[in-house]
Amino acid sequence: MKKAFILPLLCMLFLSVSEASRQTAVQKIRFSSYKSQTRVVIDLSGPIVFTQNRIADPDRIFFDIENSSLSDNVNSSVPIMDGVLKKVRMSQFNEKTVRVVLDIDKMSTYSVFILEDPQRLVIDVYPEIAGESRKENRGSPKTLPDKDLNKIETIVIDAGHGGKDPGAIGPGGLQEKDITLNVGKKLGEILEQKQGVKIIYTRDKDIFVPLNERTEIANSHKADLFVSIHVNASERRNARGIETYFLNWTNDKEALKVAARENKIPISKMEKIQDGLQMILQDLARNNKREESMRLAHSVQSSLVNSLRSDYSKIEDLGVKYALFYVLVGAEMPSILVEISFISNHEEEKRLAASSYRNKVAEAIAKGIDTYISQSTLVVETFQKRASGG
């Protein structure tokens, strides 16, 4: 009788251990508070599926992470108290579900997305803006961005990919992470010398930096501009050219493909996720970041095309575009992503391998930034004259 009773118990124990081993571990909560948002990041051991809801009395948002369990020694309650969120707390809601709760102080809206490699659930919560529900009078003047655009003091340069993430690889074996690092450091040197600005690099060597941490670096340094450097790739080997992006919703298939590749997710997932960008756009529109990012993108794109065409043939202008790039989400300053050439194209890969071409690219981006700063100065001066009746 004992043996007959013990065997089923052992089987049940084995199944429960096996089931637990298949669950995703919820490992850590961390947060960053900025002027335009509070970002909460949940570190995970693997992929997840979750549901979400907002409920009142008291006001809170909760996320139920399915087939998951809390890791041992995880800090299950993190106080924030930044005027947007009171705290974040986690619990094992049932044996297969971890519930994450954000206790709200004052919030207008929020967005949520998943980042991979490593897996993270990222929640951006946007503060309540005084008077945001009131409609603006048609005759009222346009407000300027928070910072004087003629006082660009700090620029963050983001060399795409790095470390274990090589990015796109050309037919000759050239890796995106090496090109972006070289161009990014050269760009920084030029801007320091010609503009006298402070340069912050998200990486200055071959290391891996998660996508969400790149804009967090820019925000923590209160940067004035964020420029992310990448090289393009396509299944079409004859694809070539230069394009510059800013953050916005898009239904352009090619732009979605580029964003999906840089975000390291399938195009099908990219199409589903980007709908959540509508919430982020409300914040972008409120403080002119979208408009300024677009102006910066046009200035850099024009400079790249015109400068490179003076020395190289078949430089195709693919224009300024927009898409949901995770690396741009949450930036508190004008931000762009530059795709400097197609590493998948044999001829453009050879150009990217040459230091002379990379230097020319860096000089052209720097010139575009210089033009943007000069134009921004005129915008500020014109606005001030009109405001004073001059």
Image (cartoon, rainbow, N blue to C red):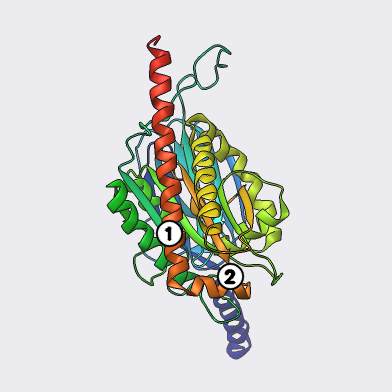
| The one of 56 and 370 positioned closer to us in this rendering | 370
| Quadrant into which the C terminus falls | top left
Q: Name the residue under label 2.
A: 348
In primary-sequence order, the first of circles 2 and 1 is 2
**Vertical placement of residue 127 versus 116, above or below:** above
Q: Residue furthest bottom?
A: 3
- Outermost residue to the top: 389
Q: Nearer the viewer, residue 343 or 126?
A: 343
Residue 148: quadrant of the picture: top left
Residue visible at 61% across and 86% down in the picture: 7
Instruction: Tell me if 357 is positioned left or right of 81 in this view.
Output: right
Q: Are the residues tagged 2 and 1 within 8 Å (C-beta)?
A: no
**Residue depicted at x 67% and y 46%:** 250
Q: What residue type is labelled 1?
A: Ala
Residue 101 visible in the shown view? no
When the figure is inspected, residue 169 is found, relative to residue 254, above or below; the finding is below
On screen, residue 211 versus residue 251, left or right, reads: left
Instruction: Give percent across and percent down for residue 172.
Output: 57, 82
Identified by mark 2, the residue type is Glu
Most extreme residue toward the front, as rendered? Answer: 310
Q: Residue at x 71, y 59 (%)?
A: 268
Examine the image and state in which quarter residue 46 appears.
bottom right
Query: x, y (%) of residue 306?
Result: 54, 52
| Residue 41 horizontal side relative to residue 342, left or right | left
Circle number at residue 386: none
Q: Which mark, residue 362?
A: 1
Q: Which residue is drawn at 47% across and 67% down?
A: 357
- Circle 2 sits in a helix, a strand or a loop, which is it? helix
Measuring from the top left, give residue 329's x and y in whole percent: 50, 48
